[in-house]
Amino acid sequence: MKKILFSAYSMDFGGIEKSLQTLLNYLIKKYEITLVLEKKQGVFLEKLDKNINVVEYRPNDNKNIMVRKLLNFLNRIKFILKYKNKYDFSASFATYSKASSFVARTSSKNSALWAHADYMDLFNNNIEFEKFFKSISFRKFKKIVFVAESAKNSFLKIYPELEKKAIFCNNLIDYNIIEKSKENIEDVKKEDIYTFVNISRHDEKQKKITRIIEACKLLKDEKKEFRVIFVGDGPDYNLYIKMIEEYQLQNNIIVVGSKDNPYPYLNLSNAFILSSDYEGYPVVFLESLVLNKPIITTNISDAKKDIDRKYGIVTNFSPLDIYRAMKNFIENNYKINNKFCAEKYNEDIINKLEYIIES
């Protein structure tokens, strides 16, 4: 059995971590897997297959620069002596992590870097874009894997000479969410009213959930009957609570906080809604489609290619555009006409994964 290694920051709640958990739980059927984390923690740790070996490689953060550099140097030497080219394949799944990059590049000559965002959206200029990729020694990887085709295309505009290294491979779908979506929940009841759900980290810088709240105010002013469930938590949780109270939307927006199992909320909704400025490729897109829920999303990642006119509506970034899409869904009871084929989707991803690992 071939030995493979993945490195990441942690297994805390998030789309990247959820994708990694799904990926590793599939790959363990065929490979012997080691997962190296900067922080051996997170809600998804206990959801990993017990046969996956999880170890920690934590950079030292001593406040004394000289001490920190010395201890990190010794830590790297220790890791090199133990793991240098011991694996048939390795991958850094945390794009932003220098430690994760070092671990993956050290562990195998056949190494890959996973890229989870369109970094031209994340950084406002080419200089910051190039500085970011240089900081993680991206040229030393044999392959660079992009979870969105738009992200790959943006990268190749800056580095066209790396076209042979760049691979588009979306995330696998976890079928277990179908069973998880059937669990009973007490805080929200199914009602005969058009219901949207947003599942995301409450971080206004990226997620821009205030756009949904502004759109809800416009719908309420028109006396539309609807509700929105917010599933999640984060630094701007209280900002959203205050805004909901200020606009007197308590009867329209239900905030349930972070949930280990958000799928029953998605299941009882009529549609999923996302208002972000940028994303990699949202795992919740795939989860919505598995549960046959149409999507309203801002124009992020591959949404135009994958969602628009097929499984929902892609809007511009203003609250007014989001309001118009929500109004369309409510008035027309928007549903998906062509059911998403999760089996075919996963089959295509698995073929790409085997090429990435085996070639």
Image (cartoon, rainbow, N blue to C red):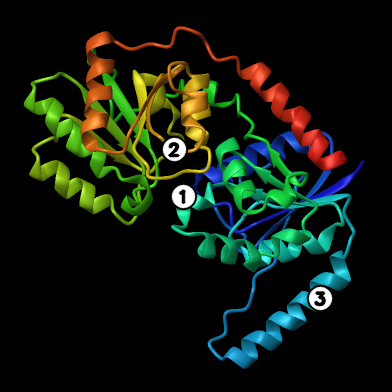
Return the residue at label 1: 121
Mark yes or no: residue 180 visible.
Answer: no
Q: Nearer the viewer, residue 110 or 14?
A: 110
Taking the spot 77% from the left edge, 56% from the top edge, the residue there is 141
Helix, strand or loop for disc 2: loop
Residue 175: image location, x then y, percent: 60, 24
Helix, strand or loop for disc 3: helix
Residue 254: image location, x then y, percent: 23, 34
Q: Nearer the viewer, residue 167 or 230?
A: 167
Asked if the residue at tag 3 contacts the one at tag 1, i.e. Cβ–Cβ closer than 8 Å, the answer is: no
Q: Which mark is residue 300?
A: 2
Q: Residues within 10 Å of mark 1 (few under 14, many from 20)?
A: some
Compared with residue 257, is residue 330 higher up or lower down, i.e. above or below?
Answer: above
Helix, strand or loop for disc 1: helix
Label 1 or label 3, whichever comes before in sequence order: 3
Taking the spot 66% from the left edge, 64% from the top edge, the residue there is 136
Cα distance in 3D space between marks 1 and 2: 9 Å
Return the residue at label 3: 78
Cα distance in 3D space between marks 1 and 3: 37 Å
Cα distance in 3D space between marks 2 and 3: 42 Å
Mark yes or no: residue 12 visible.
Answer: yes
* Extreme-right residue of the structure: 1
User: Residue type at mark 1?
Assistant: Asp
Label 2 or label 3, whichever comes before in sequence order: 3
Asked if the residue at tag 2 contacts the one at tag 1, i.e. Cβ–Cβ closer than 8 Å, the answer is: yes
User: Residue type at mark 2?
Assistant: Ile
